[in-house]
Every structure is written in structure tokens, then in C-alpha cells.
Image (cartoon, rainbow, N blue to C red):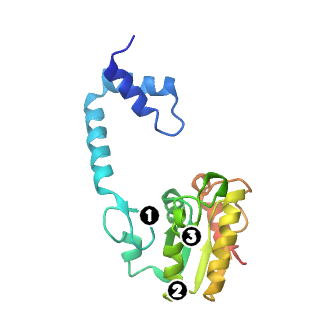
Amino acid sequence: MQTPLIDDLISALKVLPGVGAKSAQRMAYHLLERDRKGALRLAETLNEAMEKVGHCRQCRTFSENEICPICASAKRVQDEICVVESPADIAVIEQSGIFRGTYFVLMGRLSPIDGIGPEDIGLPILELRLQQGGCSELIIATNPSVEGEATAHYLQQIAKNYDVKVSRLAQGIPLGGELEYLDSGTLTQAFLSRREV
């Protein structure tokens, strides 16, 4: 029998993806038995991140500032926008070093079954950005799932309304694969082989 505080700690750890009851219990016991300093640092950092990390006003990625460092950089190609599903996708693309443009993060994908529509993934913000001009190419890098493809099609329709060239990442990304798990070589090939849609 565990105390209520230990039960609460285990329950709190179960919110992490892939962490079940046994893993959460192991983590809780490890922190309590062997790494209380680390646990306190984790708690403080989590609290600070939850309070201070928001979304970039321009691309919607996680940022501590109103505009993220990528959007604010004069070294980025401002007229190329790569649309991704999550901030994790940006991290993978940035590690490859192949893309020098800017991003737009959907924070999901269209899924009518789950009640996720265009407003829920920020498409009105992206459309306003395209309407204001300054975008010559919209690179769609949604995951090749059913929802990702539906989202890509919707994005294509929006871009065509503003005469923006649309391309889609090609070779190297398997159907049903996720950007977050690709190696940089595969991702580089996908960028180099992108095609206009």
C-alpha cells in the first residue's frame, strides 16, 4: 500500500506518452530513492516551462518570446514556409540542416471524426499570412497518414487561392511514417525530391 502522495506522483508521471503504471511507479521510486535533487530540479523546470513557454505569434511553435528565434532570424528565407504538424517535426528538419526557410506549426492535423477542424490547427492564421503576401512556396510536410494527407489537400487549396507554389515532401518518407522518427539522410532526400502539387 502506497501513501496518497506517492499515488499522486505515479499518476502524474503517467501523463507522459508511453508511460504506463509500472513505468511510472519505477520512475517515482527512482526519484524518491536515488535522485531527490534531480526530482526537485525537474519539478522546478516543469513549473517554469508551463508558465513561460507559449506559442510564436507567427509560426505557432513553442517559444518563450512573442516571435521565435527562427522567425526572427534575418538569415532565414522568409518566402518559403514549411508546414509541419508539431514542434518535434521542426527539430528533426533543423537537425538535417537542409531547410533554411520558416515554418508554420499546425499543432495537429485535420480530423473531422475527432472534431478537429481548420480553426483548431491554426489554418486561418496561415491563410492570413499567405494573404499578406511574401510567400513564394508552401512546403507541406504533414505526416503521410490519412489525416495528414487530408490536411495536405486542404493546405493545397488554401495556397492555390493566393497563387502560392505548393510542394510536398516526397521520397524517403514511408506511408504511415512520422517525421519525428526519421534520420537526417532520409529527411534530406525527402526535401530534395519534393514536388509541386
- Amino acid carrying label 3: it is Val
- Amino acid carrying label 2: it is Gln
Q: Position of residue 103 (x, y in %)?
A: 50, 71
Image quarter of the C terminus: bottom right
Q: Is residue 86 left or right of residue 66?
A: right
Which residue of the protein is positioned furthest toward the top in this rendering? 1
Q: Position of residue 64 (x, y in %)?
A: 31, 62
The answer to whether 27 is drawn above or below residue 52 in the figure is above
The answer to whether 49 is drawn above or below residue 11 in the figure is below
- Amino acid carrying label 1: it is Thr
Q: Which residue is mark 3?
A: 83
The answer to whether 33 is drawn above or below residue 119 in the figure is above
Which circle, 1 or 2, is nearer the viewer? 2
Q: Is residue 106 visible?
A: no
Q: Which residue is mark 1?
A: 61
Q: Position of residue 67 (x, y in %)?
A: 35, 72
Image quarter of the N terminus: top left
State the SS at label 2: helix
Res. 131 mark = 2
Q: Residue at x 53, y 66 (%)?
A: 119
Q: Position of residue 69 (x, y in %)?
A: 36, 70
Q: Nearer the viewer, residue 41 or 125?
A: 125
Which circle, 3 or 2, is nearer the viewer? 2
Quote the CA–CA distance across marks 1 and 3.
11 Å
Q: Residue at x 45, y 79 (%)?
A: 76
